[in-house]
Structure formats: C-alpha cells, structure tokens
Image: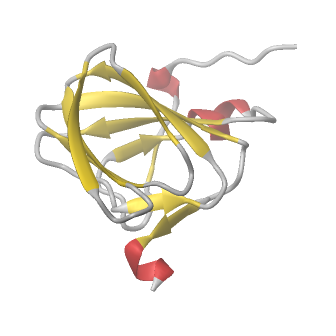
Amino acid sequence: MYEKTSLADVDPRDVEGIEPDLKAVGYQLRPAKMRPSVWEFEAGETNNWHRQDEQEELYYVLDGSFLVTVESEDGERETFELGADDVTVIPPETWRQFEAQADGRMLVVGAPNAKDDAITEEESS
C-alpha cells in the first residue's frame, strides 16, 4: 500500500545541535528504503558541518536560496549555490554544510534508511 501526509501535519522535531527546523517526513510515513525530511531554515541559519556514515543524500530546494560547502577527500572545499528547484546529490563520505541566504525549505532524502547516520566534526575527532 501507500502512505500519505501533509507537511502541515508533520510536527517539527527538536534534534540536538541542528539549527533548522526538521520535519521528519520519514518518521511519519515510515518508508523502508529511504529517509525523507524537510528542513526549514531562517535566513542565516546553518546546519552542522557533517558527513554521513552510509547514506547518500539528495537535496531538493523547495524555496529560498542556500550556499552549500562540500569538502573533497583531499581536503579541498568548494562552495556553490542552490536555489528553488535546484537538486544535488552528495555521497556519504563528503563533508557538507548548508547556509540559508534567505528563508527557505529543502527536501532531504537519504538512502538507505539508516537511523541518525550523520557524523559531525566533533564526533569524528
């Protein structure tokens, strides 16, 4: 079968150390193979500098604009912009951070569906 919900019906989750509001769509719908969420940022907010242990993540900007900083395996950092309707996929081992240039929302889909797969800089030391 299928599951359906509205973002209006998904309560924001308080996740320690994460600045943007997180609407855990996956917690509501319980998909087996992916972990979808919607992040709601205010202008100037950033998420933690992090990478994933095993999840590849797709980021789709619903509205707003973001600066994305990623770090390659050789330690080089690159920053690029994402705006409404832009999509990027970032592999698990890539360090990343998002900064909202304006209020905005982003659909984030991680796969496989691994619980709390993120590793912050402090945790990796």
Residue 72: x, y in percent?
A: 39, 55
Residue 67 is at least partly visible in this image: no
Name the foreground residue: 28 vs 89: 89
Q: Quadrant of the C terminus?
A: bottom left
Tell me where residue 22 sits by quadrant.
Answer: top left
Could you tell whether 94 is left or right of 70 in the image?
A: right
Please determine whether, in this image, residue 112 is positioned above or below residue 95: above
Residue 102: x, y in percent?
A: 12, 32
The colouring scheme, among rainbow, by chain, secondary structure or one colour, is: secondary structure
Residue 119: x, y in percent?
A: 51, 67
**Residue shown at 74%/18% (left/top)?**
3
**Residue shown at 54%/57% (left/top)?**
93
Please determine whether, in this image, residue 9 is positioned above or below residue 14: above
The mark tally for this picture is 0
Name the foreground residue: 93 vs 28: 93
**Residue shown at 35%/45% (left/top)?**
21
Could you tell whether 115 is left or right of 61 in the image?
A: right
Residue 95: x, y in percent?
A: 41, 58
Looking at this view, name the residue that lies furthest to the right.
Answer: 1
Could you tell whether 83 is left or right of 56 in the image?
A: left
Tell me where residue 75 sits by quadrant.
Answer: bottom left
Residue 81 is at least partly visible in this image: yes
